[in-house]
Amino acid sequence: MTTLEQSKTYNTLLRTVSPQSFARLVDEMERVDLPVKYVLVEDGVAPEYIYFIESGLGSVVATSSDGEAIEVGHVGREGASGR
């Protein structure tokens, strides 16, 4: 597996944390390509991973009591999703 370098990540959070904080995380990180509409966090289920998005967008979706879903926000390479 290739070691991730802080200076070469596209995620703003990972680029701006201290080198010490990044070093504590890097051994547990891996780059993955996710398919369109992949669910990162399921409502009511504790997430298993934290996703630091480097490209594309993650959608925050709210569902009404009658089951209608609506997109209420985005997470991009400036953020993370998960635990």
Image: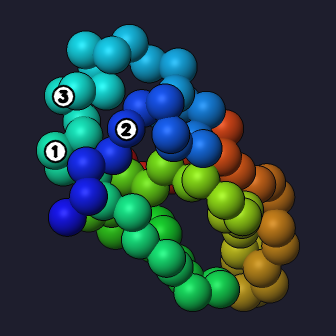
Q: Amino acid at mark 2?
A: Glu
- Above or below, comparing residue 42 to residue 12 in the picture: below
Question: Residue 46 is drawn in which quadrant?
Answer: bottom left
Pointer 1 or 2: first along the chain: 2
Q: What residue is disc 1 on?
A: 27
Q: Nearer the viewer, mark 1 or mark 2?
A: 2
Q: CA distance from mark 3 to mark 2?
A: 13 Å
Q: x and y percent of residue 61 in the render?
A: 71, 68
Mark 3 surroundings within 10 Å by alpha-carbon count, few (fewer than 14), some (14 through 19), many (20 or more):
few
Q: Front-most of 17 and 66?
A: 17
Q: What residue is pinned by disc 2? A: 5
Q: Does the residue at mark 3 contact the one at mark 2 (Cβ under 8 Å)?
A: no
The structure's colour scheme is rainbow
Considering the numbered disc 2 on the image, is that residue within a helix, a strand or a loop? Answer: loop
Residue placed at 20% from the left, 64% from the top?
A: 1
Are dots 1 and 3 in contact, CB under 8 Å?
Answer: no
Please tell me whether residue 20 is drawn above or below residue 53 in the rendered image. above
Q: Point out the frontmost of discs 3 and 2.
A: 2
Horizontal and vertical percent position of residue 30? 30, 59
User: In the rendered structure, which amino acid carries the disc numbered 3?
Assistant: Arg
Whole-Å distance between the Cαs marked 1 and 3?
Answer: 7 Å
Residue 24's tag is: 3
